[in-house]
Image: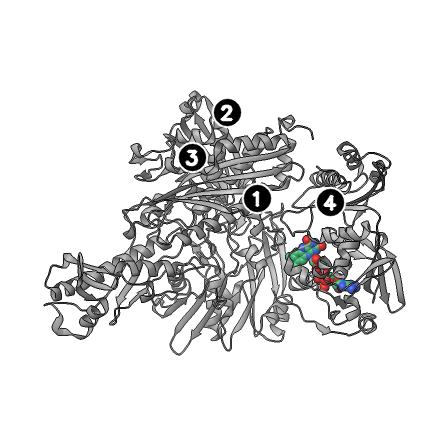
Amino acid sequence: MSGRAAYIADLAFPDVLHVSILRSPFAHARITAIDVSAARAHGGVVQVWTGADVLPRCGGVMARMELPGFVPTVQPILAHDIVRFVGEAVAVVVATSQAAAEDALELIDVDYDELPVVADIASAVAAEVIANEAVPANLVYRGHRCQDDVDNDFARAACVAQGRFSNNRVSATPMEPRGCIASHEWTSGQLTVWSATQMPSFLKTMLAIHLAFPEQRIEVITPQVGGGFGQKAHVHPEEILVCLLAIELGRPIRWIEDRRENLLSATHAKHQINEMAIAVDADGRFLAMRNRSSTDGGAYNSLPWTHLVESHVGASTLTGPYRIANFNDESLSLVTNKCPIGAYRGVGWSAGHIARETLIDRAGRELGLSPFEIRRRNLVDQSDYPFTTPTGLVIREGTFVQTLDRLEQMVDYRSFRERQTAALAKGKLLGLGLCVFNEVSGVGTRALSFLHTPVTTHDTATVRVEPTGKITVTTPLVAAGQGHLTTFAQVAADAFGVPLDDVTVLAGTTRNAHGFGTVASRGAVFGAGTIGRAAEAVKVKIRQLAAHLLQTGAERITLSEGRVHVTGSPEQGMPLADLAGAAYFADATHPPEFDPALEATAAFDPADVVLANGGHAAIVEIDLETCLVRVDQMFAVEDCGKMINPMIVEGQIRGGIAQAIGMTLLEELVHDGEGQLVTTTLMDYLLPTSVDVPDVQIAHLETPSDLVPGGVKGMGESAMISAPAAIIGAVNDALALVGASVESFPASPQRIFDALQRASKVDAVPAL
Amino acid sequence: MKFPDFSYARPATISEAIKLLSGNDDARPLAGGQSLLPMMALRMASPGLLVDLGLIEELAVIADGDATLRIGAMVTHDTTARSEAVARRTPLLRQALHHVAHQAVRNRGTLGGSLANADGSAEMPVVAVALDAVMTLQGPDGVRRIRADEFFQGHYTTAIGEGELLTCIDFPDSARSWAFEEVSRRPGDFALAMVAAGLQIANGKCLNASLVIGGVSDRPIRSESAAAVLDGRTLDRAVATEAAQIALDGVRVRSDIHADARFRTELAKNLVVRALLRAGGAND
Ligand SMILES: Cc1cc2nc3c(=O)[nH]c(=O)nc-3n(C[C@H](O)[C@H](O)[C@H](O)COP(=O)(O)OP(=O)(O)OC[C@H]3O[C@@H](n4cnc5c(N)ncnc54)[C@H](O)[C@@H]3O)c2cc1C
């Protein structure tokens, strides 16, 4: 670590102007008057805009999904007439310093007439009040992923486990909040945008459309990004606003969000209710699953994911790696007067997995089966391949049972139950939870279509062998601390058989290459796919030239240890540098018709869903007197195919588990009945710290993918898909000792206390 | 967010500071800045003049005196936590400091700032009340001394008058053995509830017990009736529980997003039991 990485707030521009945004204090209100005259007159202020100024320049952020019945929305860049959530942008001040902009902001006078508020899912469904008049009945979309008849299964089930699980609204809370700087050079007509974004190419195209600006003259540059986790995988109204101001004022415009603004107005996530039931026969075999989920989606659809990123997407993999023959579901994506919901690591999967795994444990308890045994009886096994899930996912590979066996060894299940009993005698509740999952990773066109969010995506990469045999790679994929550039360099180094030091990866500007973005566990898959394919195209030329020089067939040429040689006899060949030199500078060495460009650009989009898998287990302890939950141990088994870099894979697992602990035990964006956000600082919105996260034990399985060059699969989201379910499972396992359970999250001390008040077996704990 | 505009002064003596503060109700003393500056950044406070006490050396002294341990208002949490004299004479203070914020905040935050700030969920006010500390206030009209019991008047409200500075805090030696217990959502967060319990044991019997509960109200709550339960009794879980049951009688326990009144009450009672048993040396 050198401390030299330059994040967006570190970029210095002469002549830059600073932006401060006035945000709505009401969840739903009509703006009856805005007076900006005092702000305009304030020292250092260059411009003040309201919705009326922006509307003629841009109608707002348009977000839709091409599904019949989907109701699109437009989020104004600055609200006009009506505000629809606390934190919605109402006016902007541009000034010569940030302090002056913020001082002037306090001088803007807005009159609001408050309107009735849709503050939760119940009132959104009731639809007596409409949160956004563009959305009839507050319903953006009603999804039915599967409509199997399950009544028979439930009627003949030996055991029905059911619950109503309320998942909390959380924020991805990247340590670096959002930020964007735009500069418009009127002489060249060039618009340059520095943005802490995960989707630079997509942002470029969306800016072109929303600003009606020629795309070939837009460059989006991504500096170092301090975490994104999905929150920076959107086109935010502020990015468009900053560009409009840069074009208008002809000076660089800088917007660096502060934490309060981030918690108020950067996309929220995970807010859904799942009413789920599973039918199980007397042998513990799953017969059917029923689920009705409702997403509290906020006032507008986010671009590009929309409200569908939560329970609608979640429904597709709700039956997971289990043999569940019949599935019947409905998912409602509802508008409310809250900040729009958006992507956050694990997206709509986290909440549904919590519900499913909790119910599996409940059924196991009722039938006297261990959590491992009931899962073992139902997991899809090698002999079932190819197995088609009710939603149409074809499972061709995966190590589900091995994952379960491995977890059982790692937690040492028998001795855990003994420890649990011993602890109970001392008044302590220990609990064990687990989750086995498959991850729709490396999400491309096929995966998005499977998830019923039809979007076409592919990425490209260019690979060039330089005259001295060094390798230059350009990629559209950007990193937010995950170490992608190292991973990508490794892919290229392996392809050409050269040391890592011989490879340079150029990333961070849309001048390089086109792509969709670093989202949805795509980075490694699309990096390996694009770079692997482009490298292969260059290697064809290298083999062709080498075969000519060595007087052998191209199929007999190998690249290794920095040399190009006849397979099996490294001495019969030459350094890659010599061969590259020949291609560039020695025409006489070329075979007839040889195209000497040692450079290729290739696109990649997997031919099918790239399915990774794994599992998590958690052991927690609940203190009956304080109601605090402590995570004692975490275990992870990951099968992401061929690992490019195990250290980076494990970093992803550990970071995801920390977020899972936050989401399940600490973090909650609390709104009051008027839709007012109460948790606007990190003193109230509680992120996990290093003392809240135990050491994580990790094991790897490797089932290479045949869909991606190098056998790679994605895994960036895995821990946030499944570890939350393991942690809540553990909390409920502990609470089951006294006949209690929690179905509302996070499992805060207050909720544990409330659960204990309803406990049916309090006498299980011996009096001290 | 950026601070609103303000002027800044850094006097070298107490009397200069008082001169700057008196007659200017837009002026505020600045100690470690760990509470005041975030409030300014959030634009919830916008004093016109900050009087930085950082240069006034006599405010930053710990005096290991005969009758009392005297801690200057500007002594940082970190210095207090590391002080040998504090460990020896007021181990309760040291124990409680483990629960105050994180190292970075303790490096700057001060005892005087904490007490003057008087957050209802802060640890230092509870300790000051428990140890019968005496605050010295100095203002344009001279010096006065006030007992901790009377110093705290509500959430963020104290007896400090206009133009006055809290200059030092005297902790008399305590014959009691003390224990401090706290519950917060994460280590270093403000308390959901906390308890300081002190007592003496003579011939196996409990005497002179004292109980102060924090985080449940707008100021530290001294529970005399609960302490009285213990008088002359052999301390065990049953007796401690009996005391805990009445410890919050008559107190309107507060609610917030982390704990409602009912849960907070139960929590505090459980902590009373824990603290009493630990103070009495019971192995639990
Ligand atoms: C992240 C974080 C976590 C924290 N967690 C805790 C915690 O768990 N427990 C806890 O108790 N505290 C906590 N704090 C607060 C911390 O302990 C502060 O240091 C303390 O509350 C204020 O002390 P200060 O020296 O920083 O005072 P300042 O912020 O400088 O001042 C606070 C107030 O006191 C006034 N003041 C200061 N000195 C004097 C004086 N000598 N005479 C008169 N008035 C004066 C100021 O004008 C101001 O109004 C936390 C703070 C942060 C930032």
Residue A555, by quadrant, is bottom left
- The disc, 1 or 3, on the residue closer to the chain's N-terminal end is 3
Report if the CB atoms under discs 1 and 3 are less than 8 Å apart: no
Indicate the position of residue A521 as horizontal and vertical percent values. 39, 51
Task: Tell me: residue B277, above or below residue B165.
Answer: above
Q: Quadrant of ligand 1?
A: bottom right
Label 1 to label 4: alpha-carbon separation: 22 Å
The amino acid beneath tag 4 is Arg
- The disc, 2 or 3, on the residue closer to the chain's N-terminal end is 3
Q: Nearer the viewer, mark 4 or mark 3?
A: 4
Label 1 to label 3: alpha-carbon separation: 28 Å
Label 2 to label 1: alpha-carbon separation: 26 Å
Which chain's residue wears label 2? A
- According to the picture, the residue beneath numbered tag 1 turns out to be A665
Does residue A541 show up?
no
- According to the picture, the residue beneath numbered tag 2 turns out to be A366
**Label 2 element class:** helix
- According to the picture, the residue beneath numbered tag 4 turns out to be B254
Residue A81 versus residue A700: which sits nearer the camera?
Answer: A700
User: At x 41% / y 36%, what residue is drawn?
Assistant: A404
Does residue A231 show up?
yes
Report if the CB atoms under discs 4 and 3 are less than 8 Å apart: no
Label 2 to label 3: alpha-carbon separation: 24 Å
Which chain's residue wears label 3? A
- According to the picture, the residue beneath numbered tag 3 turns out to be A329
Task: Tell me: residue B98, above or below residue A510.
Answer: above
Ligand 1 near label 2 (Cβ, under 8 Å)?
A: no
